Image (tube, helix red, strand yellow):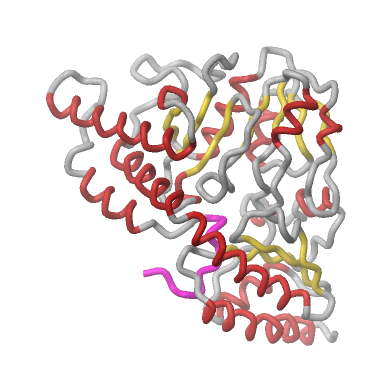
Amino acid sequence: MVTVGYLDSASSEPLHPAARETLLAALERGYADPRRLHGPGRDARLLLDNARAVVAECLQVRPDEVTFTSSGTDAVHRGLLGLRRPGSVVSRTAVEHSCVLHAVRWADAAGTVVPVDREGRVDPAGFAGAAGVVAVQAANHEVGTVQPVQAVAEAAGGVPVFVDACAAMGRLPLPTGWDALAGSAHKWGGPAGVGVLVVRKGARWVNPFPHDDRADERASGFENVPAALAAAAALRAVVEERDEVAARQRALVDRIRAGAAAVPDVEVVGDPDDRLPHLVTFSCLYVDGEAVVTELDRRGFGVASGSACTTSTLTPSHVLEAMGVLTHGNVRVSLTRDTTDADVDAFLRVLPEVVEELRARVGL
């Protein structure tokens, strides 16, 4: 069971009941190689095709545009680098996820880095005249700000556009104007280890990694058929309940934003309105973010500090630095589908005490 104090769904959402039920059932039927012609293989292929069709319906794309990968990171790397021609560069926003930065560095494809404003939003005009490939996220994974993907695509003037939608997939309708897009199942309540790569029909995409004769041209290896089906079941359930859950989470996040802002010397960051419904980030002056996370955990609340991908490096978040906001004492709170008013009440009672106690330890 997940404790009521788990407020880190942006790292990983607890397994959706629809995913759990489907996964257990699919384990009995989806074990075989879906490329074999015997009965169990055909059964596994049927499950895999069904999973692809469900995801396509939820995302309003074609089933043959959907590929399951080993993770969201793998989907990002394949989607982005597959659009890039040899020798070309990647133009990106300054707040892309670190897996995009790593892919660009690996390919030696650094191009224009387009800055963002204090809310974390890019100006589409910065992509005018872009060359190679454009990388722009659907919504920011740290502060929740939604990006103007369609406007960026129009400004780029026909340059292929890759969208990292890992933070937004299932929670918001997909943007338009992209050529390839990536998502991650555990972000919406599916099993970990399932990524979704969507490549538009007609996009000039070429597999950037060694080919695997036994796999679909966009991925490698043996798909986890039960997990893919469970991911699809969770996505369908999340999309069906999206409006109701998002409205409830927005109201709770508004309360957290107001409560955090009321603590002295705390800055709430990200767009207050055009954002992911479940996520809020704030920074506390004079305290260390990891210390806040540790003290909140001692009181039963699981939150994150900065980017989950940079916390271990002990370096400031490149997202917050690019926004020009306070990077010290950063805390990211992200609600699950089951977070209640009572959970938020308890969190808001504890937060000022934790900040005050940590400041007192250093004589403030």
**Residue 242 placed where, x, y %?**
49, 54
Percent across and percent down for residue 329 are 76, 68
Which of these two is toward me, 83 or 173?
Answer: 173
Q: What stretch is highlighted in magenta?
A: 1-11
Looking at the picture, tell me which residue is in the foreground, 129 or 34.
Answer: 129
Question: Which of these two is toward me, 328 or 179?
Answer: 179
> Can you give x and y, in whole percent of width and height, for residue 281 in the image?
70, 63
> Is residue 4 one of those drawn in magenta?
yes
Q: In this view, does 241 lie above or below 77?
A: below
In-image side of 101 versus 342 (left or right)? right
Residue 347 is a magenta residue: no
The residue at the point 34 percent across, 51 percent down is: 19
Query: How many tags in the picture?
Result: 0
Q: Looking at the image, which residue is at 77% across and 66% down?
A: 268
Q: Where 186 falls versus 279 (above or below)? A: above
Q: Is residue 197 shown left or right of residue 83?
A: left
Q: Looking at the rendering, in which quadrant would you find the N terminus?
A: bottom left
Residue ID at (73%, 28%): 153
Dominant secondary structure (helix, strand or loop) of the stretch shown in magenta: loop
Q: Looking at the rendering, which quadrant does residue 220 occupy?
A: top left
Q: Which residue is drawn at 84% across and 76% down?
A: 265
Q: In which quarter of the image is residue 350?
A: bottom right
Q: In this view, does 123 lie to the left or right of 334?
A: right
Residue 290: % across, % down: 67, 68
Image quarter of the C terminus: bottom right
Residue 55 position by quadrant: top left
